[in-house]
């Protein structure tokens, strides 16, 4: 909490990216790693745009067991090969403590997804690592519950926690979730941790992403996580919410004046 530590927590990820500082790093990439070539296409396009961090799921927490579950270790290998190719550090989700060493070996930043925000065993395990962790807010979690989950990680020694607002469940069905932007200034008031926003999973539809991304930055977000695919209509998951690299380029242009103003 702020009472414990007044200054913002700041740390580097790779050579070109700092969380908790002045810059607003964007983490972008596909929902899932679908294959080597398509990942390279996406990563090259994002690298060209100056995106500092690549995301991509290897283990996908899908609602249906019959949906694409991710390529597992093969996807992790593709991600780390792409890091060699572009120099972009990589972010990927860990779903199970049994995969800890495997994911640790390949990833630069570990992500705990919304469905695992209160998987206390998993939180305790990543709390013993020396790599940053993106903790996504549970889709029905209160701010207090969210912060206590972050405590599970930090109390084990890992202070490099990034909080991610990714939308909460409400009665509304026009959007996939409801982006709780009030969480951003509230979390920043209560904690010293960097707070990022994932508008992709909050909205579930590409048309609303630019407006809500601008709003997230205006609200004080320390970073963004946005899904991007070179051919969203062919994506094996979350195509409807994935920007194209062109869409991402336009968004970056629109973000510049807002980022400067905050
Ligand atoms: C993801 O970022 O790939 C993901 C599954 O997000 P969430 O856990 O927020 O649903
Ligand atoms: Mn996704």
Image: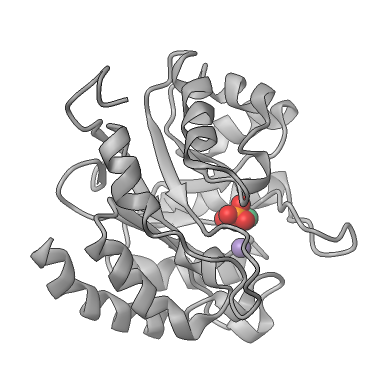
Residue 6 lies, with reference to residue 180, above or below; the image says above
Q: Nearer the viewer, residue 50 or 139?
A: 139
Q: Quadrant of residue 124?
A: top right
Left or right: residue 261 versus residue 122 is left
Q: Would residue 47 be visible to someone looking at this image?
A: yes
Residue shown at 55% from the left, 25% from the top: 126
In the rendered image, the residue lying farthest to the front is 171
Dividing the image into four quarters, tell me where ligand 1 lies. bottom right
Residue at 39 percent across and 51 percent down: it is 183
Q: Quadrant of the C terminus?
A: bottom left
Q: Residue at x 30, y 84 (%)?
A: 250
* Viewer-proximal residue among 189 and 110: 189
Please tell me which residue lies in front, 163 or 110.
Answer: 163
The single residue placed furthest to the top in the displayed view is 156
- Asked whether the viewer can see residue 48, the reply is no
- Residue 86: image quadrant is bottom left
Q: Position of residue 43 (x, y in %)?
A: 45, 65
Give the number of callouts. 0
As drawn, which residue projects farthest toward the left?
Answer: 261
Q: Position of residue 130 (x, y in %)?
A: 43, 22
Residue 42 position within the rendered picture, expressed as x and y whole percent measured from the top left: 49, 71
């Amino acid at each position: 909490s702020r009472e414990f530590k007044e200054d913002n927590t700041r740390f580097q990820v790779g050579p070109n990216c700092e969380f908790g500082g002045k810059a607003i790093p964007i983490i972008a990439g596909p929902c899932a790693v679908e294959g080597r070539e398509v990942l390279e296409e996406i990563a090259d396009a994002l690298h060209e745009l100056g995106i500092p961090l690549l995301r991509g799921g290897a283990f996908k927490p899908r609602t249906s067991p019959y949906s694409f579950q991710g390529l597992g270790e093969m996807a992790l290998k593709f991600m780390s090969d792409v890091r060699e190719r572009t120099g972009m550090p990589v972010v990927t989700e860990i779903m199970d403590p049994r995969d800890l060493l495997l994911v640790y070996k390949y990833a630069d930043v570990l992500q705990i997804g919304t469905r695992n925000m209160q998987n206390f065993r998993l939180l305790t395990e990543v709390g013993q690592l020396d790599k940053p962790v993106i903790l996504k807010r549970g889709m029905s979690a209160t701010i207090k519950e969210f912060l206590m989950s972050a405590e599970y990680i930090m109390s084990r020694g890992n202070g490099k926690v990034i909080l991610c607002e990714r939308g909460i469940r409400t009665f509304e069905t026009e959007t996939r979730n409801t982006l709780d932007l009030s969480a951003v200034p509230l979390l920043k008031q209560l904690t010293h941790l960097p707070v990022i926003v994932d508008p992709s999973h909050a909205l579930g539809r590409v048309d609303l992403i630019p407006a809500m991304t601008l709003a997230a930055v205006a609200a004080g977000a320390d970073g963004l996580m946005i899904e991007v695919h070179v051919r969203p209509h062919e994506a094996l998951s979350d195509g409807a919410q994935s920007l194209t690299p062109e869409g991402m380029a336009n968004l970056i242009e629109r973000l510049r004046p807002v980022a400067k103003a905050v």
